[in-house]
Image (cartoon, rainbow, N blue to C red):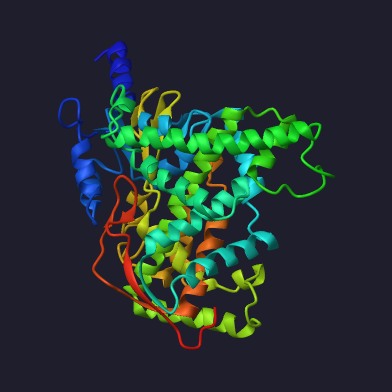
Amino acid sequence: MDAAALLLLAAAVRARMPPGSTGLPLIGETLRLISAYKTPYPEPFIDERVARHGGVFTTHVFGERTVFSADPAFNRLLLAAEGRAVHSSYPSSIATLLGARSLLLTRGAAHKRLHSLTLTRLGRPASPPLLAHIDRLVLATMRQWEPSATVRLLDEAKKITFNLTVKQLVSIEPGPWTESLRREYVKLIDGFFSIPFPLAYLLPFTTYGQALKARKKVAGALREVIKKRMEEKAENGGSIGDDEGKKEKKDMVEELLEAEGGSFSEEEMVDFCLSLLVAGYETTSVLMTLAVKFLTETPAALAELKEEHANIRDMKGENQPLEWSDYKSMPFTQCVINETLRVGNIISGVFRRANTDIHYKDYTIPKGCKIFASFRGVHLNSEHYENARTFNPWRWQISDKLQNAVGANIFTPFGGGPRLCPGYELARVVVSIFLHHLVTRFSWEETEEDKLVFFPTTRTLKGYPINLRLLSESIC
């Protein structure tokens, strides 16, 4: 074989896509993936392909050829390469419903400034006023359960997280306005992975048509609030209040109105706030619910958690709200949250698109190709975590040094790189406060069996219905 032929052969080897199957014409393997993720155990979809092709393989889902990665090293490279070798890329249904100016979809300098603003507002959960507000909001919800109640815990958790996020964004307290907005958000989120039919807004009976209609209502409600705040600022001669440069901004809208000399447009602020509401509402509430479900199914873990929080309660004065020092005194609670994130995989992975040809091992992923970095495929792999599909919060304790060293390096429940979730610590605080008040005030039992599903989002099928009873020694 001459040199030219060898060069052609080498080029062909370098250009080889990861192995896999594109399935049926047009729909590819989409139906197989959806079918698997609508069950409590979607692992076979990943396991079978990893066994056949390795940790990085090619499939065809949601209308296009996609490289699927359950390889932790490749996932880390993808997360770190955001804005250079890859960029964030999501199905058109999500892009339309969130808006082009949302935090999830913006790129480059625009994303950097929005991410920075979000960190400013949500990245400081140690703030005493914020901690006190979370504490009050959780207790206000729980008082409605006294002395006993049957509730769908996921619904109750969503009320807490939605009202908290609304307060942080636009300073509106829970009431008819927030509840009306929340109902529209349910419809909006349901449309994320629906089929974006042309002229779907004329087909309100479809999931996507209902989501578009809900999006219009949500955007309209937020626009009305933002417009009023912009008018108030103009009436005050361009300022929001006395010493506005020195005081802490009261909410995200105020941050946006003051940022960069007030350069954010009304539509930019609407899209940004709408997308933050989705993030704060959906993921944290599911994390709260799954933590309770997994603890209920693991009595030893629940007993240890109760002991930790009973000790904190005994050291507090009567009716004293939790403080940052209390949160930092919850080591086992953090183990429970970590393990819930690992087993539950509230965010199963992230989509990226190659900005250039990407060479990894013996493969070349061509420019323009869609890539899915699967967090679930890593977190539930027994090569990385012992008994990976068993809920075991003790694996995160400091004493388990080997598991910690391996697990922490590939643990990405909040993403990573420039798109690391800016509210990840706040989410932990909310769940910790919720668990504290739940286990020190109530006992509970499941009213019926409920199963986890993972499409279109991670959730329990029935909202996790439970019977709650106020503990005799508890005073709310």
Which of the 4 quarters of the picture holds residue 8? top left
Viewer-side residue, 390 vs 243: 243
Q: Quadrant of the N terminus?
A: top left
Q: Residue at x 54, y 82 (%)?
A: 475
Residue 83 lies, in percent from the top left, at 53, 30
Residue 452 lies, in percent from the top left, at 28, 58
Q: Residue at x 47, y 51 (%)?
A: 179
Q: Quadrant of the C terminus?
A: bottom right
Left or right: residue 67 versus residue 308 is left
- Residue 89 visible somewhere in the drawing: no
Viewer-side residue, 53 vs 458: 458
**Please, is residue 321 above or below residue 90 in the view?**
below
Residue placed furthest toward the front: 176
Residue placed furthest toward the left: 24
Q: Residue at x 37, y 29 (%)?
A: 92
Residue 48 lies, in percent from the top left, at 19, 47
